Image (spheres, rainbow, N blue to C red):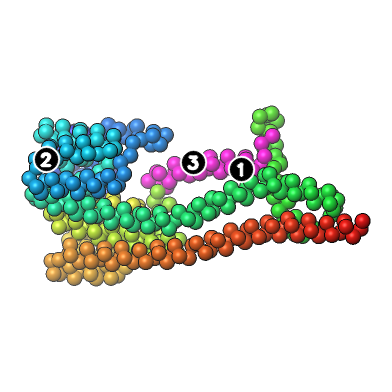
Amino acid sequence: MKFIYKAQTADGETIQGEYEATDRAALIVALNKQGVHPLTIKLDNGRGSRGSGLANLFKPKVKLRDIVMFTRQLSTLISAGVPLPRSLATLQQQSENKYFREVIGNITKDIQGGTSMGVAFAKYPDVFSDVYTNMVKAGESGGILDEILKRLAAQAEKDASIRKKVKGAMTYPVVIFSVTIIAFFGLMLFVIPQIGKILTNLGGPHAHLPVYTQALLDISSFSTGNSIIHLIPGIGSLPLIGGFPNLIFILVVMGVGIYFLRRYINTPTGKYKFHSLLLKVPVVKDIITKVAIARFARTFSALTSAGVTVLDALEVTGHAMGNKVIEAELKDAADQVRNGKPLSEPLSHSKLFPPIVAQMLAVGEETGQIDKILVKIADFYEEDVDTVIDSISSIIEPVMIIVLGGMIGLIALSVMGPIASLSTSVSASG
């Protein structure tokens, strides 16, 4: 098998490359003989170059609920003593997702050919995460695959529940904000110019208008004009482009800017800076941190209880955090654990993990019940996240209604007030 690895030399330099090996363990041994320490190891499935760019828009997806159902059913079949290939064949027939059926079929063929289940799953990182495949490998080696699959399903359901709550809290404000922006642009391009003509006809070109009304007319005039394009040499003179309104030009520029910004954010440096920025936003930081702590506690507990070593569990858990800053903290913690320190010590100095996490972890290390302690931490923070999201949801709706109502009221006042005033003046003078 071909692996893609990133490793650190004795001088502290980070290197990366490709290597043919029978499995991950053989690759680690080979790298250690070269005097380098592996940081990340991924199986090369030959689809890396095709998995980026526009291809991602049309790439088949497997929904999380399909993974949860597959995992629970597979656990039940294995517990009932059904052979693994037959269990997978049964689940392949039941799946409604065409791509997922193809993946399960390929995994079945690999297992029948002698490949271990964990390695077969690892060939499809777009379907099965690092956490999933590593826990499956641990379950295979420990002979507790059915129990591990049950834990995986429960963990996936917890993650899905948290994601659903976060998305649910964001859906309403995003929809209202989008409708407001579209309505504002529509008014600026089509409605306000006509109202401006009415005001000019009623009061003349030198009519005295309220400040807010004049500001609205100026914004509309700028939006429908094409002054920006004519400032660009060689562009404004083109017939097909020179007539574009400023607003359309600004939207196009914003769209291009957002595209390149997203590309930058997808780079390692950009992603780290973006995640660091998110952790500075007051409410967002609170939610991200609590979700990450809950995910860390539940994932690390499941891995260690399945027989995965602390260092391997930290590496896998770090990749599952979804935030590069928190992942970097766990990586630093792993380095200190490698040097002989207990995990609770580096976490006690963390700026992101609350002191209670390190204290409870220290108790778990002393009593030998780390997995049980971490499950309690996960339950606590998941309930805390639910409370925070529910409170935010209850506040967002009235605030958005007030903002939207205020904008509509301001526009109505800016339009109807001057029309009524000018109509009265015209009637009095007549």
Residue in the picture at 68% in, 56% down: 411
Q: Quadrant of residue 120?
A: top left
The residues colored magenta run 243-270
Q: What SS does tag 3 mark?
A: helix
Number of other residues with Cα within 10 Å of mark 1, as a class: few under 14, some 14 to 19, many 20 or more:
some
Q: Is residue 27 above or below residue 312?
A: above
Q: Kindly report the distance in space between the C-alpha atoms of the residues bearing marks 1 and 2.
A: 58 Å
Q: Nearer the viewer, residue 325 or 207?
A: 207
Q: Quadrant of residue 225?
A: top right
Q: Amino acid under label 2?
A: Leu
For marks 2 and 3, give the one nearer the viewer.
2
Q: Amino acid under label 3?
A: Tyr
Q: Nearer the viewer, residue 302 or 405?
A: 405
Q: Is residue 176 above or below residue 360?
A: above
Q: Is residue 290 above or below residue 270?
A: below
For marks 1 and 2, give the one nearer the viewer.
2
Viewer can see residue 174? yes
Query: Which numbered disc covers residue 259?
Result: 3
Viewer can see residue 280? no
Sequence-earlier tag: 3 or 1: 1
Q: Kindly report the distance in space between the C-alpha atoms of the residues bearing marks 2 and 3.
A: 45 Å
Mark 2 = which residue? 84
Query: Residue most toward the right?
Result: 430
Across and down, in percent, residue 393 comes to: 44, 62
Circle 3/circle 1 CB separation < 8 Å:
no
Residue in the picture at 28% in, 70% down: 356
Across and down, in percent, residue 157 comes to: 27, 54
